[in-house]
């Protein structure tokens, strides 16, 4: 008998084997969504290059070591290992804050997806204009 866990797509309760992150339905959808985001006309070469830079990789590791638990889950007394780093202010619009550790949050994959799907950046950018 294998160990099962929920699909990592937020809101999906399909159980999948531990060798997979997503159910069959969301494996394809997530890959398409990610590809569309990475090739969107909004994303400039510098923006994409930043996420592959040594400076970003080192800052990401530093933030995860300082805050290894998901900051959103912890607010609800749930203790989940953080695997992703979120910029509070979107890098594309706040380039000068891209390497500021104060602009980062440690999150689990589920919370990170929820934040992005909730229109977090759209609401933030409209407040600041």
Image (tube, helix red, strand yellow):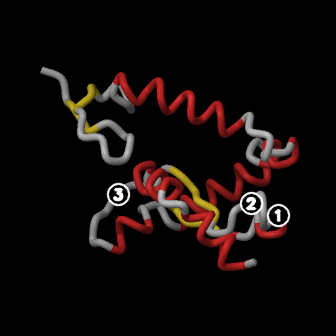
Furthest toward the bottom, the residue is: 128
Q: Nearer the viewer, residue 103 or 59?
A: 103
The disc at residue 80 is 3
- Helix, strand, or loop for circle 2? loop
Percent x, y of residue 40: 74, 39
The residue where tag 1 is placed is 95
- The span from disc 1 to disc 3 (Cα, nearest Å) is 29 Å
Question: Which of the two discs, 1 and 3, sits closer to the camera?
Answer: 1
Q: Eyeballing the image, is 126 above or below 114?
A: below
Residue drawn at (64%, 63%), measured in percent from left and top?
Answer: 87
Image quadrant in which you'd find residue 92: bottom right
Residue drawn at (87%, 47%), measured in percent from left and top?
Answer: 46
The residue where tag 2 is placed is 91
Q: Are marks 3 and 2 in contact (CB under 8 Å)?
A: no
- The span from disc 3 to disc 2 (Cα, nearest Å) is 25 Å
Percent x, y of residue 81: 39, 55
Q: Are marks 2 and 1 in contact (CB under 8 Å)?
A: yes
């Amino acid at each position: 008998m294998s160990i099962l866990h929920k699909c990592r797509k937020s809101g999906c309760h399909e159980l999948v084997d531990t060798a997979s992150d997503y159910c069959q339905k969301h494996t394809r959808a997530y890959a398409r969504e990610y590809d569309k985001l990475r090739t969107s006309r909004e994303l400039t070469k510098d923006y994409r290059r930043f996420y592959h830079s040594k400076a970003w990789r080192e800052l990401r590791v530093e933030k995860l070591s300082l805050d290894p638990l998901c900051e959103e889950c912890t607010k609800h007394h749930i203790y989940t290992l953080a695997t992703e780093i979120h910029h509070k202010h979107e890098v594309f619009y706040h380039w000068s804050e891209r390497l500021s550790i104060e602009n980062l949050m440690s999150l689990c994959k589920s919370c990170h997806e929820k934040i992005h799907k909730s229109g977090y950046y759209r609401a933030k950018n409209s407040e600041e204009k």
